[in-house]
Amino acid sequence: MKKTTKEYSLNDLPVFFRSQNYEELKNASLFILKKDEKNFDALNSLAVAYKNLGNTNKAIEVFTHLVNLNPKKDFIYSNAGNFFFDIGKAEQAQQCHEHAIKLNPKNWNSLNQIGVIQANKGKNEEAINYYKKALSVNPKEEAIYITMANSYRALENYSEAAKYYDFSSKKLSKCQQLECYYMLGDYENFYKKLDEFSKNSSPHPLAATLSAHAAIRFDKEDNYNFCNDTFSFIQKTNLYKVKDYNDSLVEDLLNCFNRLKISTKAQSLLTNGVQSTGNIFLVEEEPIQKLKKIIMHKIDVYKEKMASKKSDFIEHWPKNFFLYGWLIVMNEGGTLGFHMHKEGWMSGSLYLKRPKKLDKYDGDIVFSKHGSNYPTDGKFYEQRIVDINRGDMVLFPSSIFHGTVPFESNEQRITLAFDIIPIE
Ligand SMILES: [Fe+2]
């Protein structure tokens, strides 16, 4: 029966949650909390709703309040842990997940997430132990197979990684598995699976990266048409030409980042630098949201401009995506090895601060068709250096490898890197 006046009950919460109707989940939670302000289920639902509606500050407030009420429900700590990790608070996330496991040693999400936190610190063996425990509780959960595979991949155990990626139907997992076959030298499976993937799935940047790399290595035609003439899709603009971008915004941003004390993560390719964890754009601080708007606008302009070139990259541009950003702070001698952004569709980097050049290419960005320690058999892979000034923003397809030219100046290089991530 249709409700004439909006009245809600606790039974509505799981319904709205499952249908991802977060606006109604928020309304229902608030309705219940008016009568019963300490209702744990309603508080939990309210926090989850705020999180998914992008209202990060409210979500922090409600999750913190909820955890302080000390409920004896493990899923509440587990949800709070997921949230704190997403916003770059890894320590808080770990505490929440550990508490959840104390209350319920079979909370597989928290077991899996502690694994992810360990993996982020570069402790992949420890992470795998947690994933194994999580799988013993829930052997059907795809997310655990993916995190397990990722840790084996980070440990360069490609055969185990390939085995675990096989349990996932996600496009990224299929591509990660392809990469494992490539690294293992199992070219029969590599080309067989690449062929299957090309026929059955819409394009993916990682498949494009692998196909392009293998084509050069084996002197073959690259039949994976993600973006021909890849380097021509690299575009640089200087944000100081944009009305709202100026030194005071940059200063506000840097103050914001210092104040937030976001956790950092291990990044094996990064020397003399740190990388933030979580999505910086979830932080509801004015300078960050202002910058997000500028970047989103520039991405629209980029897409328009590139549309004249026929490519799957533009034609299959994701309908649904979100912007995911992180900081890379490098000190003297800093460098970042060649990598590509597997989870992104289009990537970018904005140079908030860059050191003075003591040598011609100091601190510039280099693009290449080779990276990630792929085997080359001595083949030549072209590179393109892009000269970087303060305020420059470079946009490019996520399939291109890129790295940083080491610099010797004692000034810091602060980059905001970002991806647009398709929602599958
Ligand atoms: Fe990058």
Image (cartoon, rainbow, N blue to C red):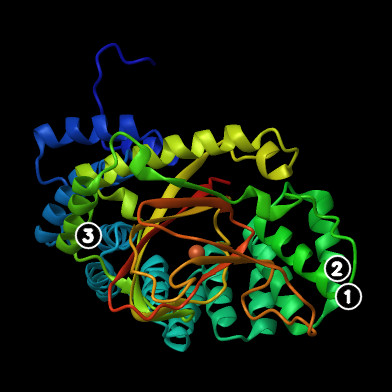
Say what amino acid the circle numbered 2 marks: Tyr
Q: Nearer the viewer, residue 317 or 232?
A: 232
- Evaluate if marks 2 and 1 touch, with contact meaning CB atoms under 8 Å apart: yes
Q: Of the two numbered discs 1 and 3 on the same chain, state the one appearing first in sequence.
A: 1
Say what amino acid the circle numbered 3 marks: Phe
Residue in the image at 30% along x and 33% along y: 243
Q: Quadrant of the N terminus?
A: top left
Specify few, some or many for label 2: CA neighbours under 10 Å numbering under 14, 14-19, or 20 or more: some
Mark 1: C-beta under 8 Å from nearest atom of ligand 1: no
- Seen in the image, is 171 located left or right of residue 222? left
Residue 276, quarter of the rendered image: bottom left
Residue in the image at 84% along x and 73% along y: 189
Residue under circle 2? 191
Secondary structure beneath dot 1 equals helix
Residue under circle 3? 257
Q: Is 40 placed above or below 192 here?
A: above
Residue in the image at 36% along x and 51% along y: 391
